[in-house]
Structure formats: structure tokens, C-alpha cells
Image (cartoon, coloured by chain):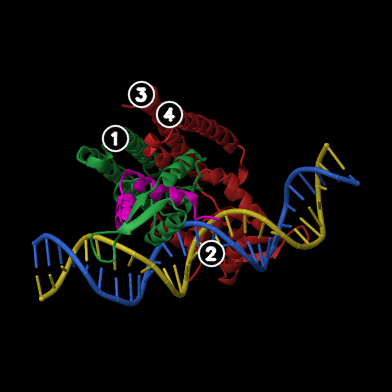
Chain colours: A green, B red, C blue, D yellow
Amino acid sequence: MARATQTTTAVLGVLSIEPLTGYEVRRVIGDVLGHFWHESFGQIYPCLAELEAGGLVNRRPGKRQRSSIYEITTAGRDRLRELLAEAVVPQPPRNGLLLRVFFGRTMPAADLADLLDDTERDSRARLEAYSVIRAGMVKEYPYAEHGRYWEATIRAGELAAQAQLAWATETRSALVEVPAT
Amino acid sequence: MARATQTTTAVLGVLSIEPLTGYEVRRVIGDVLGHFWHESFGQIYPCLAELEAGGLVNRRPGKRQRSSIYEITTAGRDRLRELLAEAVVPQPPRNGLLLRVFFGRTMPAADLADLLDDTERDSRARLEAYSVIRAGMVKEYPYAEHGRYWEATIRAGELAAQAQLAWATETRSALVEVPAT
DNA sequence: CCAACCATGTAAGTTGTTACATGATTAA
DNA sequence: TTAATCATGTAACAACTTACATGGTTGG
């Protein structure tokens, strides 16, 4: 059976926008999909090799020595459409912050306060990051036609960060400022 | 080196509330922490064995044949406090929904609409589930003193679900109801 | 009496991370 | 000239999932 289909979806997806080297695929996944997707380095090359073996991408020499450019084939585009239609694979929840809050009674109040402060800072940093991404989006040439879809993913992050910020503020006053019974 | 520390934290955490069998540990993690944490079956027993070997829990025979009850030791409580103070291990993002939306231009509009409808339904179901959990919380005897912390984790889920619902509605009108250029 | 649930454990397989090895090219 | 970046790949390891195997207990 093939590699985790979602990795294939991500790789094939970025190659559907423009042909890239393996190194660039990784960079695009990090820079462009980074706020909602992650692939570790060691996944990219084996996945590209499988795609090539299956005729879903073509490999041709790049400008530099040893470098290859991968280009999606028609079969690859069909496969991508299939993959996108498949059911979303749910990520099992593993929220380390909430795990700590749940057992918060066991922690010194100061540690819990720090944790919530960090969360608040993180939410604000994420909100800031999204507005930077949005500003940069205007300049990103090959992605222009995807703009509305990309915008929707940024909006999702923004709303999630706002919710997290509201939660951190609210929880701080409920758990830290009001002493435990 | 020991098992992923966060699994240890979760297991030791539930045992800090009351002594349980391995089977019950799994059930509590599913039922009580389930909305923000997950441990697969095959993790629990090896983790308990390690905890026992390290003197962090004691094992004594349970009521049934072959059953064992694990009880946290003083060393175990100290270790739990340490683990809770450790930095949160961030979960690399892998949001299958946003992956599909990002490449939404490649999908038929009807598929995207279905995806967003599913998301909306899921958000509502989650909101409903949280109010059920909250109602049940009143009756949960051994967790009473953890009530405020538990409540905070539910609130986090609630705010996240609300944000997701708002996003799905907003995105549906932006991407599906307004035709693509 | 039979289905559902309680209970424990293992083994095989998949997935994902990290570190290593190697070297070309480019910009400061 | 030297540091950063581009570029590819592998190997070892760690983490996690799933299926299997086994059998006791309880409630309808």
C-alpha cells in the first residue's frame, strides 16, 4: 500500500501549481502551507520517488548539477482530484496545553499563569503572522488564481487564534486570579 | 530513554485522581480527556509497565482474575508535577480540511460545498457534545475538585468549535455561493 | 445462554523524525 | 574566501496503530 495518502496529496498539490525540485517542494510546504500543514524532510524524497514510479510526476534535470525538477502529469492531476475528494483523515487530538490545564490543580499557580501567558503571547504572534502572510500574498505570482482559497485557510487560522486568545484571557481570570478553594 | 513523556503525563495524570486498572485508564482517557487527548490502546499497558518498573506506580491485584489496579506513588506524584512543568510539545499541524480547501480550485464546487457542510455539522455536533459533557460533569464524583480545570478545557473546545462554525459559514458564502472567476 | 463488556498483553506493520553524508552554487 | 543556501539521499530510530490472541464476568 502506498505512502500515507495525505503526504501524497500535499506533494502532488504543490506540484499542481508549478514544477519544483524536491528541495523547493519542501520549502513551499513549509512557507505556504506551513500554518496548517507539515511534512518532515525525510518524507519528501521517498514520496517523490513513488510518484515518479507511478507515473504521476515526471522527473527532468534541473539547472544545477544533481538537481531534478518534478512536473505533474495528467495522470497526476487526475489522482490529485481523487485524493482531494477522499474523506478528511482526522488527526487524533493531542493538546499538550489542555492536558496541563486539566491537571492544573497539581501545578503551582505561578506555573499555570506562565502557561496561560505564553498561550496569550502565542495567539497574538499568530495573529500578527497571518496579517504578514496576507500582505505577502499579493505579491505571490504563481498562486494568484488560488488566492481566494489561500485566503480562506488564513482566515481559519485567524479565527482559531482569536478563539485561543479569548480563551487564554478568560481562563487566566477564572483559574489564576480567583484563588482555588 | 523513556516513552514519549506526554503519554506518561496523561497516564500518571489520571492515576493521580484515583487508582485504576489499565482498561479503566484507557476508558478515562477516552471519555474524560477525549475531547483534547488521545492514546491508542497499545500504548497504555507498556506505559504502565514502565511506570511500575520506575516505582512511579504500584500494582496490586484487582477484584477480577488477572486484573490489576495501579496506584500512583509519592515518587509518581513528584514526577507528574515535573512533567506538567515541562514545555508543551507542539503537535505539528496536519489539517486535512484546510489542505483540501487550499487546493479547492482543483475540486468540483459541489465537493467543496459538501466539505464545508460537513464541517458545519461537525462544529454543531461538537458544541452539542460539550453541553452534554458539562451536564454530566456535575455527577462525576472523584473529579469534583478538578471541576474548574476540567471546565476550562471544555470551554477551550467550545470556543474552537464556535470559531470553526463561523469559518465554515463565512467560507461557504465566499467560495461556493460566489462563482469562481 | 449469549451478547456485551471487562481485562491483559503481544507482534507486526506503518509512519514520521533526526542525524548523517556529500557536495555544488551563490552572495556578501 | 567563507558562510549560507541549494540539493539529494539514506539509515537508524522513535512513535503510534491495528490486529490478534485469550479468556473471565455480568446482565438481560
- Chain ID of residue with mark 4: B
Q: Amino acid at mark 1?
A: Glu
Q: Nearer the viewer, residue A153 or B164?
A: A153
Q: Could you tell me which residue is drawn at 65 percent across and 52 percent down?
A: B24
Q: Amino acid at mark 4?
A: Ala
> In whole angstroms, how far apart are the C-alphas of marks 1 and 3?
13 Å
Determine which quarter of the picture holds residue A27. bottom left
Dot 4: what SS? helix
Q: Could you tell me which residue is drawn at 39 percent across and 50 percent down?
A: A11
Q: Which residue is mark 3?
A: B179
Q: Percent from the top left, x then y, of residue D15? A: 49, 61
Q: Which mark is residue B109?
A: 4
* B159 versus A107 height, above or below: above
Q: Which residues are magenta?
A: A1-30
> In whole angstroms, how far apart are the C-alphas of marks 1 and 4?
15 Å
Determine which quarter of the picture holds residue A46. bottom left
Mark 3 on the same chain as mark 4 = yes
Mark 1 on the same chain as mark 4 = no
Decide: marks 2, 4 in contact (CB < 8 A)?
no
Q: Which residue is mark 2?
A: B76
* A29 versus A127 height, above or below: below
> In whole angstroms, how far apart are the C-alphas of marks 3 and 4?
9 Å
Dot 2: what SS? helix
Mark 2 on the same chain as mark 3 = yes
